[in-house]
Image (cartoon, rainbow, N blue to C red):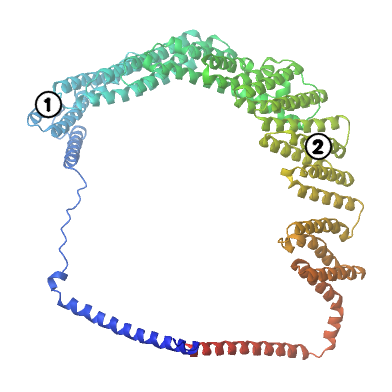
């Protein structure tokens, strides 16, 4: 039979074997290290020498053509500067004719040099030399003026000196087709001759603007038919610049026009610019650019019509007339089908600007009635405009404002499709602003705006969600307008509550419409109470009808979002009722109790058990308010109504779930009475409260010990000790005075010695355990 030694002997054998293995492992590791060192010394040095690193070529930061172009550009610039210095400053001893002849000869030589350079394929150098030659021609013009035409008219001379170089540079660039600089430079200079010739002939702003627009047309033709890309790019830039200058001049003339003649001249300029834009769109090759240009042409046509309409129609009808022109724009401007969207975009821009022009009147109609808050039931206004603006300022010329959004709405409806629902906002604006614009009677204005709310709710129920929020905003404006008279307020609030309630029954957007309906019902309840002459605290009882209705309606609604909206609105109405009753304590207690009843009724539903906490809080607050109204200053009268239900609830909870902590079940309920009573003991001159509190704390402590519950044991024991200390404090003070002064230090010293001795004993025990463990290993 196998012999098994005792555990102690077996442990000793295992430890001996492990030490032997550790010693053998150390010997093997030492041998391995010696072998590695010997092998490293045997390796040849060449094998361990670092390998040479291939040189890295430096990175070139510029290309050869780039360097060449920079050098040529700098050379041309320096030569041009030298020529300018020679011409303007350093005339030397030469006469005026000699200096001009030298400069002209140099210019001809420089302009001829690119011919030879191009034959040798030095194109970049030829470009630089050609640029120098063009700059020298400008200096020739100046030298010629100083030599022979000093007394001539400056404007005429400039017109000639821009026309001739433009033609010469064009011919030069055409003859030397390989050069890219002369023709774009000639095109830039060509922007000046026409305005200068007009100015030399004594023409005014209109003639100059017409000349500039004709120049822009020439640029467009070059951009459309030009073969070289640099020429086309420069032509486009010049066309945009010249066209913008011409349109700006036309706008200035239109604003300064005081009669049909001046307005017609401005309209001609706008029409000329529009014709250029339409021609560009017609013959352009890129459809995206052509659409933008076509849209600009359409806007220019409307501007031309506006220039004439400004002096022929009144201010009130100017914007509707312009809007009609914008609407008719797609039918007037004929462009290819590929760019037909351009006039449509221009028409949309005109319609948008027209709507912006109507915005001040609409804002005055919607926001003006907010001032009624401080002037409730002051009497019926003279008309709808006076009701909206409170007798304030109405935008000038806004009598025809309703026509503008109405026309836009018609256009959107005619377009059909998705655009039809976007017709609702302008249609709403037209109807809302109509009574104020036409100065309709006050009652008629309220009726019209109420019908607008009904129509918006119908549209929101059908297909247009945006109509819902328009209905809410419009109804708010109507409600504020109705604050002028008592009858109007009651009627409008009742109608609005009914309209939104009917919309909520349709199902779509029910959360919003139901909440708004209850909100207007709350306002109606307050208005009814105010009309009856009730005080605010009595009106609060009437307002509580809305939370009751919300609590009764919520279980009958299927949609969870609508249920939540109704309950939140009911809670807000309850808060309003509490706020109305806050200055009358007995009625406030009643209102709080009624709100608690409503919350308790809501808590009977399985999905709203959490409302029971709100009901408990409301009942407690109602009790406290009632006690305060009775001038009860006993703390326990306020805390016991909280403690008793809390302990009952905690007991039932632990009965259903024994795993619940005693702190969660009883902590809050016990603390609600024990802690305030403990604080009151400190200021209670009578002896009955400490006795009762101590007795209660003792009972709580015993119950906690009996059932092994931590919360009653800790709270009750702590309160019991504190009450005892409070009662014994006078005697402890007397005893401290009776003791000799050496007794407290002696007691403290003994305490420290005892703690030190205990600490030393614990350290000794730890040291002994460590030694035992060491011997075992």
Regarding mark 1 in the picture, which secondary structure is present there? helix
146 or 741, which lies in front? 741
Mark sitting earlier along the chain (2/1): 1
Along the viewing direction, whichever of 57 and 493 lies nearer the viewer: 493
Does the rendering let one see residue 151? no
550 shown above or below 161: below
User: Which residue sits furthest front?
Assistant: 1
Q: Which residue is mark 2?
A: 548
Q: Residue at point 81% right, 23% down? A: 379
For this view, does 248 lie left or right of residue 767?
left
How many C-alpha atoms fall within 10 Å of the one at disc 2: few (<14), some, or many (≥20)? many
Nearer to us: label 2 or label 1:
2
Q: Nearer the viewer, residue 51 or 566?
A: 566
| Residue 706 locus on image (x, y percent) | 80, 70
Percent x, y of residue 708: 76, 69
Does 683 appear above or below 620?
A: below
The answer to which quarter of the image holds residue 317 is: top right
The residue carrying mark 1 is: 108
In the displayed structure image, the side of residue 746 where residue 208 appears, left or right: left
User: What's the distance in space between the residues labelled 2 and 1, CA to CA?
Assistant: 103 Å
Examine the image and state in which quarter residue 79 appears: top left
Mark 1 crowd level (few <14, some 14–19, many ≥20, 10 Å Cα): few
Expressed as whole percent of the image width and height from the top left, the position of residue 109 reads: 10, 28
Mark linked to residue 743: none
Query: SS of the residue at dot 2?
Result: helix
Residue 691, quarter of picture: bottom right
Residues tagged 2 and 1 counted as in contact (Cβ below 8 A): no
User: Which quadrant of the figure contains the N terminus?
Assistant: bottom left
Q: Is residue 253 left or right of residue 387?
A: left
Work out whether 758 lies above or below 32. below
């Amino acid at each position: 039979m196998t012999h098994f030694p005792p555990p102690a002997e077996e442990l000793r054998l295992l430890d001996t074997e492990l030490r032997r293995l550790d010693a053998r492992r150390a010997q093997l590791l030492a041998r391995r290290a010696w072998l590695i060192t010997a092998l490293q010394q045997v390796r040849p040095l060449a094998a361990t020498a670092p390998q040479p690193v291939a040189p890295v070529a430096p990175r070139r930061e510029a290309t050869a053509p780039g360097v060449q172009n920079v050098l040529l550009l700098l050379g041309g610039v320096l030569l041009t500067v030298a020529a300018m210095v020679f011409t303007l400053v350093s005339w030397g001893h030469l006469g005026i004719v000699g200096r001009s002849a030298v400069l002209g000869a140099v210019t001809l030589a420089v302009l001829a040099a690119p011919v030879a350079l191009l034959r040798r394929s030095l194109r970049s150098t030829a470009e630089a030399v050609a640029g120098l030659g063009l700059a020298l021609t400008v200096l020739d013009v100046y030298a010629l003026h100083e030599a022979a035409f000093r007394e001539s008219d400056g404007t005429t001379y400039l017109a000639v000196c821009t026309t001739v170089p433009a033609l010469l540079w064009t011919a030069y660039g055409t003859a030397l087709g390989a050069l890219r600089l002369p023709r774009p430079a000639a095109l830039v200079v060509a922007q000046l001759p026409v305005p200068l010739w007009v100015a030399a002939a004594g023409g005014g702003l209109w003639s100059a603007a017409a000349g500039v627009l004709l120049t822009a047309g020439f640029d467009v033709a070059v951009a459309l038919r030009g073969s070289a890309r640099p020429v086309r790019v420069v032509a486009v830039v010049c066309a945009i610049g010249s066209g913008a200058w011409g349109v700006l001049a036309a706008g200035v003339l239109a604003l300064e026009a005081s009669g049909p003649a001046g307005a017609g001249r401005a309209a001609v300029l706008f029409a000329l610019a529009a014709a250029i834009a339409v021609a560009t769109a017609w013959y352009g090759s890129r459809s995206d650019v052509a659409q933008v240009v076509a849209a600009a042409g359409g806007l220019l046509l409307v501007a031309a019509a506006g220039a004439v309409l400004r002096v022929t129609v009144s201010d009130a009808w100017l914007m509707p007339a312009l809007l009609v022109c914008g609407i008719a724009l797609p039918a007037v401007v004929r462009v290819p089908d590929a760019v037909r969207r351009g006039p449509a975009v221009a028409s949309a821009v005109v319609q948008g600007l027209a709507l912006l022009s109507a915005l001040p009147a609409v804002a005055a109609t919607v926001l003006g009635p907010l001032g009624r808050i401080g002037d409730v039931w002051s009497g019926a206004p003279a008309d709808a405009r006076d009701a909206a603006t409170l007798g304030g300022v109405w935008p000038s010329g806004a009598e025809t404002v309703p026509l503008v959004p109405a026309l836009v709405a018609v256009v959107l409806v005619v377009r059909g499709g998705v655009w039809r629902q976007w017709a609702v906002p302008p249609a709403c604006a037209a109807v809302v602003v109509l009574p104020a614009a036409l100065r309709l009677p006050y009652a008629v204005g309220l009726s019209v705006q109420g019908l607008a709310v009904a129509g918006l709710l119908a549209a929101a129920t059908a297909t247009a969600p945006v109509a819902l929020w328009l209905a809410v905003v419009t109804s708010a404006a109507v409600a504020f307008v109705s604050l002028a008279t008592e009858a109007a307020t009651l009627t409008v609030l009742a109608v609005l509550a009914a309209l939104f309630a009917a919309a909520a029954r349709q199902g779509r957007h029910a959360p919003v419409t139901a909440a708004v309906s209850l909100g207007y019902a709350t306002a109606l309840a307050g208005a009814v109470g105010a009309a009856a002459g009730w005080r605010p605290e009595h009106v609060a009882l009437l307002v509580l009808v809305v939370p009751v209705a919300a609590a009764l309606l919520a279980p009958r609604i299927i949609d969870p979002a609508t249920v939540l909206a109704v309950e939140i609105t009911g809670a807000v109405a309850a808060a309003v009722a509490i706020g109305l009753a806050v200055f009358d304590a007995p009625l406030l207690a009643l209102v709080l109790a009624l709100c608690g009843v409503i919350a308790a009724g809501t808590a009977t539903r399985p999905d709203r058990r959490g409302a029971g906490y709100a009901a408990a809080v409301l009942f407690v607050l109602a009790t406290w308010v009632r006690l305060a109204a009775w001038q009860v200053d006993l703390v326990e009268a306020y805390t016991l109504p909280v403690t008793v239900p809390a302990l009952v609830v905690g007991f039932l909870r632990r009965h259903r779930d024994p795993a619940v902590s005693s702190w969660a079940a009883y902590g809050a309920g016990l603390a609600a009475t024990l802690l305030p009573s403990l604080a009151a003991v400190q200021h209670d001159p009578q002896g009955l409260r400490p006795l009762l509190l101590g007795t209660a704390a003792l009972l709580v402590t015993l119950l906690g010990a009996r059932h092994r519950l931590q919360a009653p044991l800790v709270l009750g024991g702590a309160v019991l000790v504190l009450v005892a200390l409070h009662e014994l404090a006078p005697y402890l003070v007397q005893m401290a005075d009776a003791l000799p002064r050496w007794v407290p230090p002696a007691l403290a010293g003994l305490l420290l010695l005892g703690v030190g001795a205990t600490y030393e004993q614990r350290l000794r025990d730890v040291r002994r355990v460590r030694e035992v463990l060491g011997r075992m290993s």
